Image (cartoon, rainbow, N blue to C red):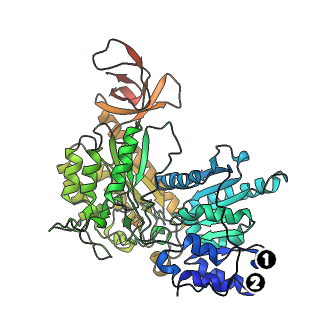
Amino acid sequence: MSISMRVLRCMPSVVLRRNACRRSLSSSTSLWHKVDIKNGPGLQHFIANSVSPSTQQEIDTSEVDIPYIDNVSGDGQKVYFDVYGCQMNVNDTEVVWSILQAKGYEKTDEVLLADVILVVTCAIREGAETKVWNQLRNYRGLKKKRNRDKPPLRIGVLGCMAERLKEQLIEKERSVDIVAGPDSYRDLPRLLALSRDRHTAVNVMLSHDETYADVMPVRLDQNSKTAYVTIMRGCDNMCTYCIVPFTRGRERSRPISSIVDEIRYLSQQGIKEVTLLGQNVNSYRDLSEQQHFVAADTNLAKGFKTVYKSKKGGRRFADLLDRVASIDPEMRIRFTSPHPKDFPDEVLEVIRERANVCKHLHLPAQSGCSSVLERMRRGYTREAYIDLVQHIREMVPRVSICSDFICGFCGESEEDFKETITLMRTVVYNWMFIFMYSLREKTTAHRRLKDDVPDEEKRRRIEIMHQTLRMITEQTNKTQLGTRQLILVEGASKRSRQVLAGRNEANIKVNFPAGLLPMSPDSQERRPVEPGDYVVVEVGFLSLLYLILF
Ligand code: 5AD
Ligand code: SF4
């Protein structure tokens, strides 16, 4: 029986409404009615707009007669986006904006002018969720203050929190009108249309194949010379602490051809840097190109394992990276976030050989202690990780590496924690993202392990990690003194218009004095340096003075 059938059963009766809907909320497309159920939208909407053709055939519509939403147009309503979390959320918002713009919505950067507020949320740690709950309270205030001459302000919660907390969002935060998980953004015009009639509209169905491959994202910052391109979604790794596999679903990759088309278009638009995105970006595998089968069909380096059965065939990340890098040699390519298990030599060779692929890798270690890594289900030991770092440095000279670390995970002893600190010092990262473990419901760690490191101790450990980070980055910055670096200019620095800011290959922000550039390589005429220019700067004393060389 299809998912929509369960929704159908909850339609005719108000008594059934709460329980039946609650059941369907956990896994499927559904609606939550605040008003009389008879006036609410019904099965027709699911059939017309949400249900795939194969599912449609399974539904018997004979017994229902429910109004039909045929106007999903935005009619110039203004949408305000409030985005939390990772780069993927920024790019998802660009997908959402593309979908809504096509239906006649407008965007506003002024929350007081909005007809609809869409909050794109993150659920990775409790702190990320707390921020959103607080903000929702503020938005509830705006809703109450709304001028009665205008249609009611509507609030939508999108993304990972929507997926994780569906019922709670509606019950606890009664001002929420739309709840849409990461795989249901195509359905937003319909959900928004339903919410206009004071219904709460919910779609949290996860998909096995949604990649939004055919949606050309509309960039939120039209002045920026950098862009994100999502190449895969979801994660099959099931690290025991992580909620992502539950909120973002199974791993799936977008066809190479659609990625190449999008990046070609971005290059024509003058974009100078693209970051390829995915929860597990280097497990990319375009299975639509099944004819491309290679004998050595594994990504796994020695000492790495996965909990899932490796996929076979198709084009892998090295192929994609090579194709993408060849589109525009003046366009920098980055990618994030990779998993250390997916760095076969083919990938490292492309990074080494292609001048425009940044020699900078994000290599999340999470812990420096093998027994903690085992409990985290990371699929490698400390030794295997260090071997990989050495191998990467041999294959890609001058590569810089950054990492993610968690302290205070279940059962982490003082000795275990010290191993994390020694790993940080051994590898000498150019940057580290560090977090205190935050228990997430549904995860394996929640079900099987004990969150037994006290908060106070977690705070002590993270402070030591911060000190270590400061010490290491001071050291690495000193080694940069006197070096010449290629900077992609972003614009004026926060400090002054006379000081410009850009990023070096290692993604570190660099400030340097504004200057002039020749109009063309042989020209005597000069123009000011602009966003999107590449300049070579010499890193000066105390990293404060940078000289433009050309
Ligand atoms: N608690 C703390 N940090 C976490 N991360 C993922 N899940 C948790 C959690 N439950 C961190 C990991 C990951 C980064 C994106 O967030 O370090 O790489
Ligand atoms: Fe979460 Fe692990 Fe997947 Fe990263 S690899 S998203 S940490 S489950």
How much space separates mark 1 and mark 2, taking CA atoms? 8 Å
Indicate whether 191 appears above or below 530. below
Tag 2: amino acid: Val
Q: Is mark 1 within 8 Å of ligand 1?
A: no
Nearer the observer, 12 or 536: 12
Q: Examine the rendering and report whether any part of residue 109 can be seen.
A: yes
Q: Which residue is mark 1?
A: 36
Indicate whether 438 appears above or below 59. above
- Residue occupying the far right of the picture: 148
Q: Left or right? Give the position of 3 relative to 146.
A: left
Q: Left or right? Give the position of 309 relative to 81.
A: left
Tag 1 and tag 2, C-beta contact below 8 Å: yes
Tag 1: amino acid: Asp
- Residue occupying the far front of the picture: 62
Q: Left or right? Give the position of 508 relative to 450.
A: left
Residue at the spot x=53%, y=25% of the render? 496
Q: Which residue is mark 2?
A: 14
Q: Quadrant of residue 241?
A: bottom left
Q: Secondary structure at mark 1?
A: loop
Indicate whether 164 appears above or below 255. below
Q: Quadrant of residue 132?
A: bottom right
